[in-house]
Image: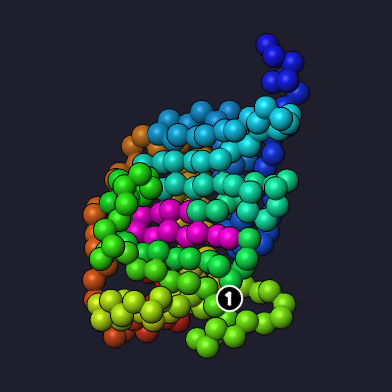
């Protein structure tokens, strides 16, 4: 066995910049506890030749996918993309550069290997206010606003979401559908594929809930 392999140190995600960071670290730790061998999951681990470290770069299941990369520092690897059925978050080193995408829950889309048709993807960007006035101190944006493409509003989609509720829903999904399986010793081979769905116009009541405290039920 190569000496370098025996001396490698596993690097866990450790940031707390975004509300989903701790959940992503918990997922990686649960995978390590199972020696990264979980039926139904594909796990990519990078072992750079220039260092004695190793770390997860991608976790792909039947209905979710998480990418890890140098987000905040070249010395750390953190979650940069989280895809769950019908929803995807992209996280940047800049707190204001959160991107939320809503689209089809087709499992082929969830894998990230097939592009979503443009007319079926709704994009929301982070900002502190509709006027895009940024504070001197970088903080998590209060809202995620729809891009200027009018298709979003014409099709009945909300103009914005509360950022905290978006993160709450992603954390809830990961906890119930990934962590629960990993920590109970389960596998992902029997996880049902999500039914394909296309975002459709919402009722006034649902739009009210989406724009306040109940994100994309």
Please, is residue 120 above or below residue 163 in the view?
above
At x 63%, y 53%, the residue is 71
Q: Position of residue 121 (x, y in %)?
A: 32, 64
Quarter containing the N terminus: top right
Q: Is residue 122 left or right of residue 36?
A: left
Q: Position of residue 60 (x, y in %)?
A: 44, 41
Q: Which residues are magenta?
A: 82-92
Quarter containing the C terminus: bottom left
Q: Position of residue 177 (x, y in %)?
A: 44, 49
Q: Position of residue 86 (x, y in %)?
A: 34, 59
Q: Which residue carries the number 1 mark?
A: 141
At x 68%, y 59%, the residue is 16
The quarter of the picture where residue 21 lies is bottom right
Q: Is residue 91 magenta-colored?
A: yes
Sort mark 1 into few (<14), some (14-19) or many (20+) by Cα contacts within 10 Å. many
Q: Count up the numbered dots.
A: 1
At x 54%, y 77%, the residue is 127
**What secondary structure is the stretch in magenta mostly built from?**
strand
At x 25%, y 77%, the residue is 155
């Amino acid at each position: 066995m190569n000496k370098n392999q025996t001396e490698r140190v596993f690097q866990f995600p450790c940031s707390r910049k975004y509300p989903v960071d701790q959940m992503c670290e918990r997922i990686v730790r649960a995978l390590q506890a199972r020696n990264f061998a979980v039926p139904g999951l594909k796990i990519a681990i990078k072992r750079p030749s220039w260092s004695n470290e190793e770390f997860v770069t991608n976790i792909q299941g039947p209905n979710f996918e998480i990418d890890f990369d140098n987000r905040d520092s070249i010395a750390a690897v953190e979650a940069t993309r989280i895809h769950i059925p019908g929803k995807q978050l992209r996280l940047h080193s800049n707190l204001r550069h959160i991107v939320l995408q809503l689209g089809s829950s087709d499992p082929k889309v969830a894998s990230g290997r097939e592009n979503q048709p443009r007319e079926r993807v709704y994009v929301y960007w982070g900002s502190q206010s509709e006027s895009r006035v940024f504070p001197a101190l970088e903080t998590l944006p209060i809202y995620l606003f729809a891009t200027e493409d009018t298709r979003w509003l014409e099709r009945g989609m909300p103009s914005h979401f509360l950022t905290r509720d978006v993160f709450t829903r992603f954390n809830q999904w990961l906890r119930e559908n990934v962590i629960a399986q990993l920590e109970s010793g389960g596998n992902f081979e029997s996880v049902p594929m999500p039914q394909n769905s296309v975002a459709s116009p919402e009722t006034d009541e649902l739009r009210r809930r989406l724009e306040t405290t109940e994100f994309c039920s």
